[in-house]
Image (tube, rainbow, N blue to C red):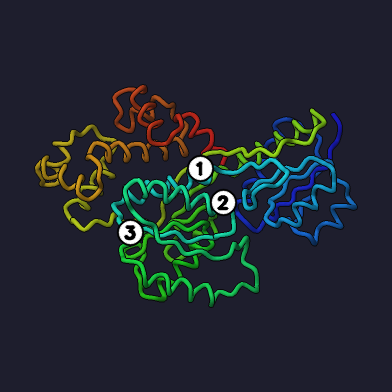
Amino acid sequence: MKQRRIALLLGQELGYCRGVLSGILDFAEEHHMDWSFRDGPSHRSFSDSLLHWKPDGIIAHVFDREFALSLQDFGVPVVNVTLTIGELPFPVVDVDHSEVGRLAAQYFLKLGYHNFGYFGSANAMFSRLRESGFSEILRQRNIRVSCLHDGFVRETPWNVDWDRMERSVRKWMKTLQPPVAILCSNDLPGRHLAATCRHLGYRIPQDVCILGVDNDDSECRMATPPLSSIALPTRAIGFQAGTILHQAFHSKRLPAPDIHSIPPVGIIERQSTDSVLCMEPRLERTLRWMQSHAAESHTITDIASANQLSRRTLERLFAQVLHMTPLQYLTQCRIEHAKALLRNTSHSIAQIGELCGFPSQRSFNQHFRNIEHLTPSDYRRFAQSK
C-alpha cells in the first residue's frame, strides 16, 4: 500500500475538532492505512508550510473562504468537516444541523416552555440551519422565536469585543418574557449568555433555560451553572471523512462536493436545563414523578392516582400546558431512558426495551424510530462513535 501524506487542518482548541481527529485516526488504524500525518491550523498562515510539505490529501475544518479556495491550488483531495461556508468545491461531512435545531425545540417543548429564543451567528451556515430547524418545529405550534445574531466565533481570540456582545445580549434579554428557553448555536456563546444572564439577575434555569451545541466538556463545565448541550457524532464525522479521502485515492479522482450529514447523538443534560418549568405546580410534580418512574409498568390511571389527581384532570393539564397526552410524554421519558442505556451499557436492544417498560422489542423499535428518526441500533452506533 502506498504511503500517503495527510494534512489535518483542524486545530485542537475545539472539542469538536479533537473528536473529529480521533475519528480520522480510528479509520486509519482500523483499515491499516499507511498514512503520515501533519496537523496544523486551518488558517492562511499555514499555507507556506503546507506547500513545502506537499500533502497527498487534506482534511480541514474550513471556516475561511479565501483559505478554502487556496486549498484548490494543491490539486489533491480535500474533505471539509464543517458546514460553516456554503458552495465550496469540497465534500463536507458534518452533523445534520437542521435536526440539531429540531431536537432542541422538541426537548424544550417537552419541558413545558412557551417562550423561545435563539442566539447564534447570522454568517455561519451551520448556525442558520440550526436556527431554521429550531424555528420550524415551533412554527408548527404557531410559536415565534426571538433571535439574536452575532458574528461567528470559532474559538476565543484575544481581540473579541466581549463588552459589545454583552451589551447586545443585555438589550435582547429585556425583550424576552421569562421563563424562556434559549438554544445557542454552540457551547461558547451559551457560556457567555449564561454569564450575562447571571449578571442581569436572571436565575438559570428557573428564568432562562440554556442549551448549547457540541457538548464540549470544558466549555460546558466553565459555564455557571454547567451547560446542557447537544452532543455531536464527531468521531463518526472523522471516520467518514477518512473514508471519503481513501476512496478518492482509490478512484484517483477528486471527490464530488456533496454534503454528508450524520444525525446528532442527543442531549446531555446538566444544570442549565435541569428544571420542569410549568405554571401549574401539580403538572410539574407529575412530570418529575413520570421521569423518575418511566421504566415501570404504570397505566395513566396509576400515574394520576400516585399524584393525587383524577385521570381527567391529568389529561386536561397535559393538553392545556404541553399540548400532548400523558401517554405521549411517558413514551418520550422511556425513550430518553433508553438512549442513556444505549450510550452507556452493552445491554442488547431487547433488554433495553424491556428495562424501559416497552411490552415488546417491536414496540420499542417503533416508538424509538417515531421519536428519534433512527433505529435503536443506529442510535447506539452513532452515540458510541462520539
Q: Nearer the viewer, mark 2 or mark 1?
A: 2
**What is the crowding at mark 3: few (fewer than 14 residues within 10 Å), some, or many (at least 20)?**
many
Instruction: Report the residue marked by disc 1.
Output: 264
Quadrant of the image for the N terminus? top right
Cα distance, mark 3 to mark 2?
23 Å
Q: Amino acid at mark 2?
A: Phe
- Residue under label 3, please give it: 115
> What secondary structure is marked by label 3?
strand
Res. 14 image quadrant: bottom right
Residue 177 position within the rendered picture, expressed as x and y whole percent measured from the top left? 31, 66
Image position, residue 368 (x, y; %): 39, 32
Question: Which disc number belongs to residue 126?
Answer: 2
Residue depicted at 84% across the width and 52% down the height = 50
For the question of whether residue 272 can be seen, the reply is no
Q: Residue at x 32, y 39 (%)?
A: 332
* Residue contact at pointers 2 and 1, CB within 8 angstroms: no
Give amino acid for label 1.
Pro
Q: Where is residue 263? Give x, y as percent.
A: 52, 39
Q: Is residue 66 found left or right of 236 in the rendered image?
A: right
Label 2 element class: helix
The Cα–Cα distance between marks 2 and 1, rounded to whole angstroms, is: 13 Å
